[in-house]
Amino acid sequence: MLPLQQAYEVKHSLIEYLKATFRFKDKGVHDAFYNFITHPEEGIFNGPYMSLKLPFITAGGSDSAAIPLEIAPTFPPYHHQLQAFERLTTHDGHQPQSTLVTTGTSSGKTECFLYPILYYCHKHAGRKGIKVIILYPLNALATDQAKRLAEAIWNDDRLKGRITAGLFIGEGRDKKHFESQMGETHIIENRTAIVENPPDILLTNFKMLDYATQYPPKQTPMCITNIKHFLDENGNIAAGMNVSGRKMASFLAMIIDHSTAQQEEEMTDIDIRCNNRGCHGAILAEVNRSENTIYWGCTDCDHEGMISEWKGSKWDNSNR
Ligand SMILES: [Zn+2]
């Protein structure tokens, strides 16, 4: 196929089509119309244009063998995907770095973060609670990616039945229409199911995330929290959170501070008051060193929780 010849043929078929569609009996009008649409500068045709886009670079043979993930793509990744995997991996105690990927359409930007998060969830599959939050500006984007996430989990025997993901975007109250289980092409969409049993991966938007932090629980559920979700890249409590989020983060930070200073392996009074409104109970906590979790609970009400990923945070006193 000769591109320039094709461009010429497309132009002429289109002119013929327009001439046949808009027929004028008056020859003068007909000619004026023809001259109007084919005018080299003011007419409807521009180009042909040539695109000099280069293909995305694939990671070299030996590079793709060196993907630092156990849950990894079966295809050889692009160079930029491998770079993203190296920055985002949690393999061998590597701390993921803040990463911005800007490449063209269909260059596999989703895979850049999808495999590192699936690997992270796989490594921590035994631990309850939300491990990853994926934020989307548009519900349509979240819905599209939910399907890809469902397929990635379903098609990997190490993940299928072990890793859950939920779509929390302001729909999904109706049990009949919104799935409450993982499937081949869908993730959990039922809002009640998501709140009652938080998935490993949560796909949501800013508004719903804000709403989720204030979700009024009927009975106080066990509050399973990854302290990193409340922090910015410098390890400080993220300034952009709403008031209830910041209050919760400060409360958890105080629990980490006091409990790691004492290092007790059984429930001990750590000199903090319960943050439930109207409750004057004391908070007891224990540090589980083998699992790196801190379990805490109130003496007077049923407020209780578990904190993970506190090691190395600003409030960790365990090495002091
Ligand atoms: Zn209490």
Image: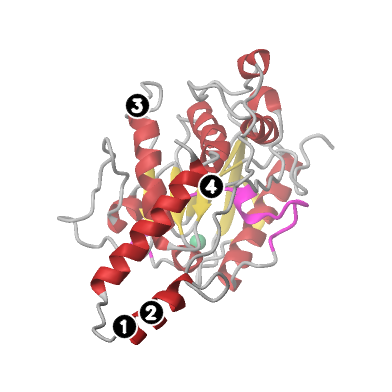
Q: Is residue 51 magenta?
A: no
Residue type beneath disc 2: Asp
Q: Quadrant of residue 267?
A: top right
Instruction: Check disc 3 and report its element: helix, strand or loop.
Output: loop
Instruction: Give me the C-alpha separation between circle 1 and circle 3.
Output: 66 Å
Mark sitting earlier along the chain (4/3)? 4
Q: Is 314 located above or below residue 113 in the figure?
A: below
Question: Label 2 belongs to which residue?
Answer: 31
Write down the residue under mark 1.
27
Q: Which residues are magenta?
A: 217-238
Q: Nearer the viewer, residue 100 or 306?
A: 100
Q: Work out whether mark 2 precedes mark 3 in sequence or the reverse, and give the earlier one.
A: 2
Determine whether the residue tagged by mark 2 lies in a helix, strand or loop: helix
Q: Position of residue 228 (x, y in %)?
A: 64, 48
Check whether the beta carbons of the residues at disc 1 and disc 3 lie within 8 A of each other: no
What distance separates the C-alpha of mark 2 from that of mark 4? Answer: 43 Å
Residue 92 percent location from the top left of the image: 68, 22
Specify how the rendered protein is coloured.
secondary structure
| Mark-to-mark CA distance, 2 and 3 | 62 Å
For image coordinates 61% across by 35% down, the residue present is: 55
Q: Which tag is nearer the camera, tag 2 or tag 4? A: 2
Tell me the mark number nearer the camera, choosing from 4 and 1.
1
Label 2 – label 1 distance at C-alpha: 6 Å
Mark 3, residue position? 155
Mark 2 residue's CB less than 8 Å from ligand 1: no
Which residue is label 4 attached to? 105
